[in-house]
Amino acid sequence: MHEYGVALEIAQTAFSAAGTRRLSKVTLRVGELSGVFAESLAMYCDLIFREKQCERVEVVSVTIPARFTCACGAVYSPRKLFDPCPSCGGADRSVIDGKECSLESIEVDND
Amino acid sequence: MTESIRIASSVYAANDAFARQNRLLFAGKKLVALNMISSPGSGKTSVLERMAARYGSALAVITGDIQTTFDADRLKAAGAAAVQIETGGSCHLSAAMVHKALTRMDLDNKKLLVIENVGNLVCPAAFDLGENKKIAVLSVAEGDEKVAKYPALFARAAAVIVNKTDLLPYVNFSVDRVREDCLKLNREIRMFPLSCTTGEGFEVWMDYCAGLTN
């Protein structure tokens, strides 16, 4: 729902880091628990880059699976988000991975 | 020649920085802050109106909607100190929006601050506003499958208000199912079935709030 705003922020950061060089690729990391729909984010990034820079910028989105530590000590990736711990059935967990949403890296052409 | 540049910039970093500032401000004012999240029409403002009748101006509310000041107007009329944020299209409140709204409020002599988020069960759950607790509100007219369908909010909420219980005889809604689904996600979650129309169950919710602010 809010992916357009997130995409605008990412584009701004990417262009600012690229400076006068041509941006050719951006790599995003989108966690399954981030509240951001990766496919939609990539689509908006693509649209914004096309609008701001005539040539195409490749958008790569890496999905970071959700990973929890349970109070029982088990570390698990749920089959469905928020499924209980497969070892003890509990829900007392803390997030290890999956909340992040970041612009990981960019590629620029120096020519 | 192509050059790769590592950026590692979190899109939530700016929000989290404002959330930390908000949290410090709340702590400095000895204020308990609740982030109230629900679908549109669950009755958040009605719950707050009843709370305002008890707390009066010791209750501060920041209320978010796409547009209109209806909610802030209702809450001011009920006696609370209220500020409206019109998001102009954004589906959730951000910590920066709340930070800005806080500059428009006098937080002295307040006990409780409730941030009434934009009506939406999805996006608001992902944004830290600096609150002490997230409170989910669900009304019985929405159906009892909402917890299973939108787990992110209920996994993070400290409490869930099940509102409009006076309508239970007329709708297919199992409070027990909601309780079971909530506990599967979050063992610590507290449940408060209540009706803003009849007042049934409201005292239990007020006792919980009193426990937070005392």
Image (cartoon, coloured by chain):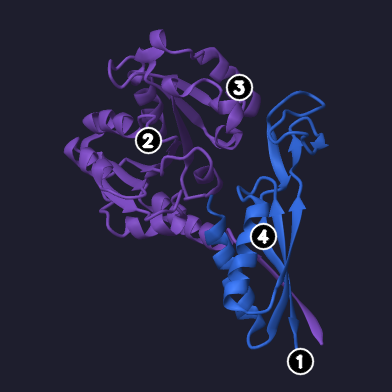
Q: Secondary structure at mark 4?
A: helix
Q: Residue furthest left?
A: B77
Note whether B111 is above or below A24 in the view shown.
above
Question: Residue A77: image x %, image y %?
Answer: 79, 39
Disc 1 target residue: A111
Disc 4 target residue: A42
Under mark 4, the amino acid is Ala
**Protein chain holding label 3:** B
Which residue: 74% across, 40% down?
A68
Question: Residue A88: image x %, image y %?
Answer: 79, 24
Could one spot residue A44 in this view of the protein? yes
Taking depth in this image into account, of A44 and A15 the one nearest to the observer is A44
Question: Residue A39: image x %, image y %?
Answer: 68, 53
A1 horizontally vs A92: left or right: left
Which quadrant, please, contains the N terminus of chain B? bottom right
- Per the model, the C-alpha gap separating discs 2 and 1 is 62 Å
Question: Pointer 4: residues within 10 angstroms few (<14), some, or many (20+)?
Answer: many
- Per the model, the C-alpha gap separating discs 4 and 2 is 44 Å
Chain ID for blue = A
Pointers 4 and 2 within a single chain: no
**Protein chain holding label 4:** A
Q: Nearer the viewer, mark 2 or mark 3?
A: 3
Q: Are marks 2 and 3 in contact (CB under 8 Å)?
A: no
Q: Are marks 2 and 1 in contact (CB under 8 Å)?
A: no
Disc 3 target residue: B181
Note whether B41 is above or below B71 in the view shown.
above
Pointers 2 and 1 within a single chain: no
Disc 2 target residue: B213
